[in-house]
Image: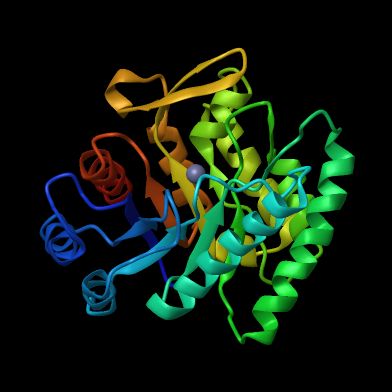
Amino acid sequence: MKKLNFLTAGIPARANDYGNAFFVLENMNLDGLEVEFVHGVRYSEKTREAILNRGDFLITHHGPYYINLNAKEQDKKEASIKRVLDTARAAADLGAYSITYHAAFYLGEDSDTVTKKMIDIHKIITEILDKENISVWVRPETTGKKSQWGTLDEIIELSKNFDKILPCVDFAHIHARENGKFNTYDEFCFILEKLGNELGQKAINNFHGHVAGIEYGLKGEKKHLIFEESDFNYKDLIKAFKEFDVKGALVCESPNIEIDTKILKDYYEGL
Ligand SMILES: [Zn+2]
């Protein structure tokens, strides 16, 4: 990637469809959006055309919420694998840069056991994508709830086994899951440094992450908030991004969508 791109999570609030979305992004000088396949990987021909005619805007994909690659029932596990594959197939169809999804729940198993299972399942996923000639960054997201597999360390461990798998770093989730930690300049630098050290410069040059204000409790994330109503220290995060010269996509998931995305980009450009 040539630069850091600022993306909205889904269609901007003031747009009503994808055709309109890219006009809004253009007017606001934003860089793209994350297509959210919340309830399944489906899109109309009209949406497809609008996305394919987006010009220079960058897109990423968020896979459906109903994914649990550690499901005990074989049919649920297979349906989850298919949802990841379909998200990657949509990326190939629409020209998305990267896909992300919430990979799994522990369901009473320990971190090492589930990480090993995730490595095996992602071997299956990447082999199928290779066969289909689909080359897109595949990224389990760092998760916000303690019941979910997906700490930064777990996803780094997984990524080490693959060329095209990297973490999608959700800073709000990490902050919520760690009960308010990871909210200072030094802590943000620690995360970026760890990515570079453990996965190489490709992780910094091809970044994909999420950020938002967030409400949290003892079990981790509760809900997303706008920056103004949250304790999330986005300014120091953006300073760390500048310091490490991170390139790729930073997707803002605040409920006011384009407003907080614009705040991030303006702050970045003002540094
Ligand atoms: Zn997510």
**125 over 267 or under it: above or below:** below
Please indicate whether residue 54 sits to the left or right of residue 157 in the image: left
Percent across and percent down for residue 147 are: 68, 28
Residue displayed at 63% across by 57% down: 79
Is residue 212 in view from this perspective?
yes
Percent across and percent down for residue 114 are: 83, 43
Is residue 1 in view from this perspective?
no
**1 over 38 or under it: above or below:** below
Q: Nearer the viewer, residue 173 or 190?
A: 173
Percent across and percent down for residue 265 are: 29, 49
Please indicate whether residue 230 sits to the left or right of residue 150 in the image: left
Colouring chosen for the image of the structure: rainbow
**82 over 116 or under it: above or below:** below
Percent across and percent down for residue 15 are: 13, 52
Q: Nearer the viewer, residue 70 or 205?
A: 70
Q: Which of 223 and 108 is in front in this view?
A: 108
Residue displayed at 59% across by 47% down: 141
- Quadrant of the image occupied by residue 154: top right
Residue displayed at 65% across by 77% down: 129
- Quadrant of the image occupied by residue 206: bottom right
| Total numbered badges shown on the rendered structure | 0
Residue displayed at 78% across by 53% down: 118
